[in-house]
Image (cartoon, helix red, strand yellow):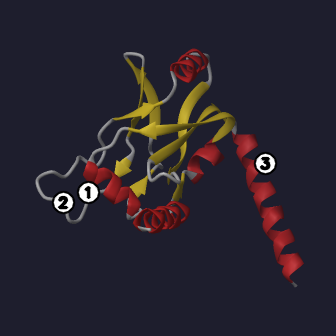
Amino acid sequence: MLLGSLNRIFAVMSQDLYIKNKKAYFEYQILDKYTAGLKLLGTEIKSIREGKANLNDAFCTFIDSQLYVRNLHIAEYSYGSFYNHEAKRDRILLLNKKELKKLQTRGEEKGLTIVPLALFISERGFAKLEIGLAQGKKTFDKRETMKERDTKVEMERAMKR
């Protein structure tokens, strides 16, 4: 009975948290998406569950065949003592070897980069980072994206009337 209630609590927690990197969708054209686990400290996961994370300046890079996310800002846990973490430390992303190898070869191609798209808590209670293999947009592509967004908003307004 206790286990069933805990599962419901985790299910409710996982639905509430979805931190999105809106800037990435505007700056880049996303080619492939992957879901990676994060290697975190105890105070980091508690802070993420409070929703105190920011993906705006974050990017992914390979260091010694390991994929790291850099500049991912996770605020210090408010109730943490001297065990608290650094807000912008490098964190290892957990992927299969096959996926890591594929990302490393594709990431070395000219014009492609790996960007974090969203941070969320899975159904099992683990922090997951959705990353994407992306290609930078040109200025005219960004203008086109803005036009599409404006027309979509106008259509929604017209439908409500």
The residue at the point 57 percent across, 50 percent down is 23
Residue 99 visible: yes
Residue 76, numbered circle: 1
**What SS does tag 2 mark?**
loop
Characterize the local packing of mark 2: few (<14), some (14-19) or many (20 or more) Cα atoms within 10 angstroms: some
- Location of the C terminus by quadrant is bottom right
Q: Looking at the picture, how far across and down is residue 56, in whole percent?
A: 48, 49
Check the image and report above or below for 108 versus 56: above
Left or right: residue 140 compared with residue 45: right
Check the image and report above or below for 130 versus 12: above
Alpha carbon distance from label 1 to label 3: 39 Å
Q: Earlier in the sequence, mark 1 or mark 3?
A: 1
Q: Label 3 belongs to which residue? A: 144
Q: Looking at the picture, how far across and down is residue 156, in whole percent?
A: 83, 72
The residue at the point 33 percent across, 43 percent down is 40
Disc 1, disc 2: CB below 8 Å?
yes
Q: Amino acid at mark 1?
A: Glu
Alpha carbon distance from label 1 to label 2: 8 Å
Check the image and report above or below for 99 versus 153: above
Q: Amino acid at mark 2?
A: Gly
Q: Label 2 belongs to which residue? A: 80
Check the image and report above or below for 106 versus 58: above
Closer to viewer: mark 3 or mark 2:
2
Residue 137 visible: no
